Image (cartoon, helix red, strand yellow):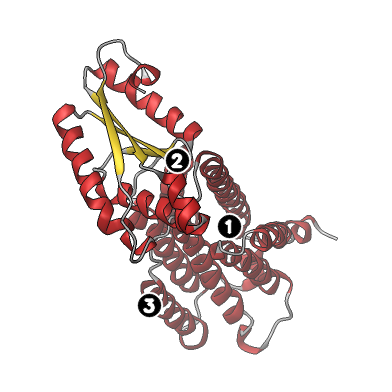
Amino acid sequence: MSGQFFISLLNPGIGLLLAGAFLLLWLYRREYRYLLAAAAGHAITAAAFLIQDLGPVLPMELQRIPANFGYLLAGCLLVGAIIAHYRVAVPRRTMAVICTVSMTIFLWFLLVDPSIVGRIYAISFALGLIALMIPVCLRRLPKRHIVDHIFFWLGIVWALNYTLRPLLVLGVTGDIANYVGFQQSVYWTTVQFTQAICSVLSAITLMVAVAIDLMAELREQADGDQLSGLLNRRGFEAAAGAAVRACADEGRPAALLIADLDHFKAVNDNHGHAAGDAIIAAFGAHLRAEGPAGTIAGRIGGEEFALLLPGSGIETARALAEAVRTGMTIACQPCLPGATPPTTSIGLAVAVPGAGLSQLM
C-alpha cells in the first residue's frame, strides 16, 4: 500500500472518531441538539472523503456529485452546530442558497464544460462563505470566555483557508488536467492536511465550550434555590460579597434589602406547605420582576430574602422596598385564594467605606 492510501484515510478516520465523540456527548445531553448536528457533520465529512478518494469510479465521474455535496452539507452542519451553541438562529436559507448555486456551477464544470479547477473554485468558495457565517453571527455577542474569541477567529481562518488556499496553490502549480493528477497534486495534499487540522481544532473548541456550559449549569445548581428561582445563601453571599467589594474599590454605594415573610409558619400551619412553597415561588418571581438590572437576589433562609443593589443609595433602596412590599399582595394573592394575602417586612442598609457584606447584613 502506498503512502497516498494512508493519507487518504486521514480525514475519514478523524471524521468518524469525532462523529462518535459528539454522538456520545449528545446521548448524555440530548437537549444539546447541535451536538447531533456536529456528529452528523463529521460523519458526512468522512463519507465524502471516502467517496472522493476510495470510491468506485462511475461514468462521467458522477461519484464526484455525492462527494462534493457531502462537503457542502457537512460544512453547513458543522458551522450550524457552532452557531446553535450560542442559541443564535442558524441562517439555513442562506446556506441553502449558497449550496444550490455552488452545486449548479459544479455540475456545469462536471457535465457541460469539464474543468477540475472550476469545480474546485465552485465548492471552495461556497465553503468559505458558509464558514464566514460564524463571525457574522457571533460578532455582536458578548465574548465571556476565550473559547468565544477562538470560535470567532476560527470562522475567519476557515473562510480564508477555503478561498485563498485554492487561489494561491493553483496559481503556483497551475491547472489540473485529470483526476489522477488531482489526487497526486499539491493542492489535494493541502486540502487533506488543512481539513484535518481545522476539524480537530473546531471539535476540541466545541467540546471545551460544552464543558464550560456544563460547569456553569453545575455552578448554578450549587448556588441556586430551585423553589424561589433566586440564589441560595451561599450563592448570594459569593456574588453580593464580590459586588460590595467592587463598589468599594470604585467609590460607589451599595444598598442591601432583607425581606422577611410575615407569620410564615402560620401560613404553613393553616394552609399547608404546598401553599407556603407557592408563596415562596411567587415572591421570588416578584423580586426578579421588581429588581432593576444588576440586582443580586437570593433566598438566604426559609422565608428570608436579600437583594443587593450595586451603585444604589438609600432612596433607590427605599423605593424598591416599597414596590416589593405593596406589590406582594397582587403577586402572592393567587396562592391563598379567599384568605388574607401574605405580607413582608423589609430592612435596608447602605454600605459605608470599609464595610463588607457581613457588616451590611
| Number of the label disc, if any, that sits on residue 114 | none
Q: In the picture, residue 58 is in which quadrant?
A: bottom right
- Compared across the picture, whether 168 is left or right of 259 comes to right
- Tell me whether circle 1 and circle 3 mark residues in contact (CB < 8 Å): no
Where is residue 222? Give x, y as percent.
56, 40
**To which residue does mark 2 refer?**
231
Give the class, few, some or many, for how many residues have Cα within 10 Å of label 2's Cα (few <14, many ≥20).
many
Residue type pointed to by label 3: Val
Q: Nearer the viewer, residue 310 or 276?
A: 276
What whole-number distance in Å separates the C-alpha atoms at marks 2 and 3? 46 Å
Residue lying at the far left in this picture: please name it. Answer: 315
The amino acid at mark 1 is: Val
Alpha carbons under labels 1 and 3: distance apart: 24 Å
- Front-most of residues 200 and 209: 209
Tag shown at residue 97: 3
Q: Nearer the viewer, mark 1 or mark 3?
A: 3
Name the residue at the top extreme: 354
Kindly identify the residue that appears in the image at 41 percent across and 31 percent down.
Answer: 239
Asked whether 117 or 251 is in front, the reply is 251
The residue labelled by disc 1 is 191
Task: Pick whichever of labels 2 and 3 is earlier in the sequence.
Answer: 3
Where does residue 60 sit, x and y in percent of width and height?
Answer: 61, 87
